[in-house]
Amino acid sequence: MHEPILSIRGLTKTYAARGNGGGTRALDAVDLDIRKGEIFALLGPNGAGKTTLIGAVCGLVRPTGGTITAFGHDLARDWRQARARIGLVPQELATDMFETVRDAVAYSQGLFGAPRDIARVDEILESLSLHDKRNSQIRALSGGMKRRVLIAKALAHEPELLFLDEPTAGVDVELRKDMWQQIARLKERGVTIILTTHYIEEAEEMADRVGIIQRGRILMVDEKRAMMERLGTTEAVIDLAAPLAALPPELAGFPVGLAEGGTRLTYRGGNGQGGGRAEVARLAQALTRAGIAYVSLDIHDSSLEEIFVGLLGSEEEAA
Amino acid sequence: MQFSARSALAIYRREMTRAFRTAFQSILSPVLTTSLYFVVFGSVIGSRMEPVGGVPYGAFIIPGLLMLTLLGETTSNASFGIYMPRFTGTIYELLSAPVGVAETLTGFVGAAATKGLILAAIILGTARLFVDYQIAHPLLAAVYIVLVAASFALFGFILGIWADSFEKLGIIPLLILTPLTFLGGTFYSIRDLPAPWDAIAFANPIAFLVSGLRWTFYGVADVPIALSMSLTLGFLALCVTVIAVIFRTGWRLRE
């Protein structure tokens, strides 16, 4: 495997105590490796530490402990070299509202040490469908456009690693789809992307790998596909023509149970990636062979959302 | 130590754009203020005043008035320049950029010095409409104005980082700078004050600034120019040190 583009070891951030309470531990010994060219989704509820993690890498938060290495540079020492190759799109729509779009992007370009190149700025604006707004003040733009300005600013110095903190928070469905396309295009250009979200749908749609974070700890990091295979399930509900008193021997070996007074057969198994559906098909054949008639069959694969909620739930119980 | 001229230039350019965006106010306000002072103190009262140290009263007050506006504008402009990004959250970009204290200060302070020179030119041009005067050491005057503008831009920068409300932002220029400038010999020579007020007046550091600028204009001063110059440079160095420490520790900037 290639050397990770970003490597985080034992990253801890404790916020100083306010009043009598102890300090808040926003990040607790986080280890994380990001691979070049991937889209990594950091998934977690509000207050889980997603933004703090991004802030620690981007220089907005001073870590209490641990090391961060980006492009082989230790961020504590070679922060200039590392930061010149990192871009950040913050969660809040923070821009100078009176600045024009083009000025704002040209400023970012220079600030991050890239040579001033207005033609390149215009190209970036074009790619984000902002070109006709280039001379408008940012305050005159809609929320979705303001967010795209922030993305343009973050891209102005052509970063190789881009952080998107809740890129679609408060964005309507149409714009969210649009944003996903923009992100996919960036990936095609070879940009490594780390995005945080609490829309699981988003991670499911975009991500190559998913990390689940809660209370400052990474609970799990895996390929999205592998995670769904490992933790995903298929549920099937089969309504029978006549009630059964007990499960017939033909169904032994299937993860099934009887419900609704014997009129309903419930299946729960599989791997969330087709395995369950194949097994349900075999189950249906077994029913036919056993001469058991059924009137309806309903199959449902669990989503990343259900996996996520399940994980957080079991964590909640353990706590 | 590394230094990115591109980053510093980007900050400088942005600060200047910000100033020109409110150019109308930036130009009109000092023109109006200066005119009012000249109408009242220069023409109406000044015509009945004795020359001070051989300088006609109308001309005598020019350096003081210039200092009054320069200190106020530079401090509040620089403090807003850093407070607003903190307040609105746009500071994230500066903090995440490959930019250190050197680029940040070069950009911000360079712009403040440029604005200081433009402001001075506007005030001097306005003053010319009311009184006739000659500047004895124009080059030194320009250097001194740049030094004072730079120092107070740094001071404003510290103020903007320290302030956690708009009230605190406004309170230092209003309650400290303006009174001290008024009492710092803008309208009179401190040497003319009766004892013990002359001694007390020299506890006011701004008296040395006004005196220094007046020396570059007319070659007369309450204190030697070398003292004024060293005091300004000392203040500049102190502010740079404070800001370097703020950047190193991340105080009020990084969580």
Image (cartoon, coloured by chain):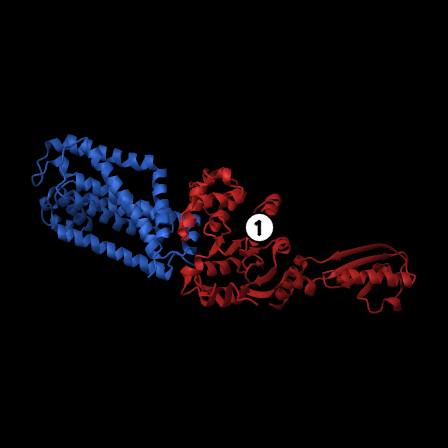
Chain colours: A red, B blue
Q: Position of residue B43 (x, y in %)?
A: 16, 30
Q: Is residue A21 above or below residue B80?
A: below
Left or right: A226 with respect to B248? right
- The structure residue drawn at horizontal position 9% and vertical position 48%, both measured from the top left corner, is B195
For this view, does B171 lie left or right of residue A168?
left
Residue depicted at 13% across the width and 39% down the height: B60
Of the pair B197 and A75, the residue shown nearer to us: A75
Residue visible at 8% across and 36% down in the picture: B50
How many numbered marks does the figure carry? Answer: 1
The reply to whether residue B163 is in sight is: no
Furthest toward the left, the residue is: B54
Using residue B4 as the reference point, say whether residue B195 is left or right of it: left
- Residue A310 location in percent, x, y? 66, 62
Tell me the quarter of the picture where residue A282 sits: bottom right
Type of amino acid at the residue the image marks with label 1? Arg
Return the x and y of residue B137 as percentages of the image width and height: 14, 43
Residue behind mark 1 = A185
**Does residue A249 appear in the picture of this structure?**
yes
